[in-house]
Amino acid sequence: MKPETFPLGDTGIQLLFGNEISEKINQEIRQFADSLRRYPVNGIIEWVPAYTTLTIFYRPDIITYHEICKVLESKYMDLQGGVAEPTSLIYEIPTLYGGESGTDLDFVANYNGITREEVISVHTGQDYLIYMMGFMPGFPYLGGMSPKIAAPRRDNPRAKISAGSVGIAGEQTGIYPIETPGGWQIIGKTPVKLYDPDSKNPILLSSGHYLRFIPISKSEYDEIENAVNSGTFIVKAKKK
Amino acid sequence: MTSPLFQVVKPGLLTSFQDLGRTGYQEFGVVVSGAMDDYALQMANLLVGNDRNEAALEVTLMGPTLKVLEEAVISICGGDLSPTVNGVKAPMWKSFRVKNGDVIEFGRPVEGARAYIALGGGFDLPEIMGSKSTFLKAKLGGLNGRPIERDAILHGTEAGRGTAGRSLHAAEIPRYRKEMVIRVCLGPHLHAFSDSSIQTFLSSIYEVTPQSDRMGYRLKGPRIKHQTSADIISEAIPLGGIQVPANGEPIILMADRQTTGGYTRIATVISTDIPLLAQALPGCLLRFVAIPVEEAQQLYRRRAKLLRVLEMVARSNR
């Protein structure tokens, strides 16, 4: 479907690719964003892919709304000719489940009438598509968690959830990139930094790729944490 | 060479370093931040001979007290928060020299909410993801990710740099009133609202409430009813986006807004009216007028041209 376009004030334009959350729409948006990256349009500052939309911010002293509409339409037409799909990676996120690192693992298990081990096995048993990034720096909106381990948010949000915490809220799972208050049920923690403002690549993840949680022990956690802190740890990522 | 230029005697209500914002990382969820009033920031910089995007101190309502440690050229633009140097009224929208031992102070807010102190040569700050702006919630950028604190020493890149005595033509100095007409482009979620609720939005007066900060302004006024749901599938949100949650009371998204959001938006404030809005205090009354995107872009281009011309003048006098 040809995307509908809407102006967002004088410096933004939104392309709407559909009305539901689906991997197919995500793929289309990703292809479009990829083409903006490979063939830059003068005047475009940046863009933000989301579940059903691609929002582009631009400078109207360089390109007008009507001009950008035309440019984007012809870009869309070009993409219909069939282009190579951009490669997707699966990032492996080592995660220590339960205990102090995942204080709500028991709650999630009890809530669903299964054991802790089963929660971990379901949670680590699949790849999650990163539909979009947002909410806070480096936070991935992940799709596809099994309803078998869904759990409501906490009635009383915690004042402090540490960076790297892995949580569940409803049928969503995610990782907190920075320390923040929050109401998610925390089931584990990763020593990997999703957000490191001082690094050359401050954000680890990006939309359109996948993520897989790998269960690790406390000693593995400590080892990886040391490597992360000394800058020698590299997150494993393989082609999908 | 970096040199200590100011000592913070009193930090003020909320004083933080801001430039034009951290662009290019929104797709990763990194908040843009930057000066609330980007017009005043750019003017303050041009007056002292800086690049427009240089970081300045954004002063909120109750300003700081700064002791000058070494000669410097500064300018103060934006809201009139009664700046003084050694107790004598300091000029606004004009660059001037301060000397070792001088004390810069602020008094009663007279007009507007935010002022910008630019320093000739710029403050010495690290660039994080291409920007020196402070994003307080993530403790990112500026001076250790925080507002300036008592006893902190603020460094400049080069003491005494910049051109003093340069001022702005009166016609280019905005007035900030208690009642403002704010121009918007309607959309994108007009289908979520009935025609009559869009009329309500455009024909009513909305008051800025005290629940307003760098992230957004909560408004009080006639409720805007939804035809369908108040929620949407999360998507990117622009500066000046006006979101309407289920309670029908609009929120205008400002510099520290999240990059994405899940509420319907009825309109977006045009970029040339954002600086006015940045100067609105709680109690300010807003009326919204819808204009076509083409007209909004003409206004943008006019302002961009003015800033470009002043920049050329500033460069040729450097």
Image: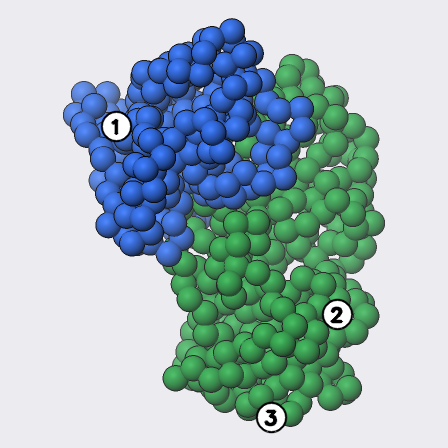
From what the image shows, is residue B232 above or below residue B159?
above
Residue shown at 55%/18% (left/top)? A107
Residue shown at 51%/63% (left/top)? B144
x, y percent for residue B85: 71, 85
From what the image shows, is residue A207 above or below residue B63?
above
**Rendered colour, chain A:** blue
Residue on which disc 2 sits: B81
Could you say which is closer to the camera, residue A34 or residue A197? A197
Residue shown at 38%/49% (left/top)? A196
x, y percent for residue A193: 37, 43
The disc placed on residue B100 is: 3
Q: Chain of mark 2?
A: B
Residue on which disc 1 sits: A90
Could you say which is closer to the camera, residue A7 or residue B23? B23
Q: Secondary structure at mark 1?
A: strand
Nearest-to-viewer mark from 3 and 2: 3
Whether discs 1 and 2 lie on one chain: the answer is no
Residue closest to the far front: A219
Q: Earlier in the sequence, mark 3 or mark 2?
A: 2
Task: Name the amino acid type tagged 2.
Answer: Leu
Q: Chain of mark 1?
A: A
In the picture provided, is A4 more to the left or to the right than B215? Answer: left
**Rendered colour, chain B:** green
x, y percent for residue B81: 75, 70
The reply to whether residue A56 is in sight is: no
Q: CA distance from mark 1 to mark 3?
A: 58 Å
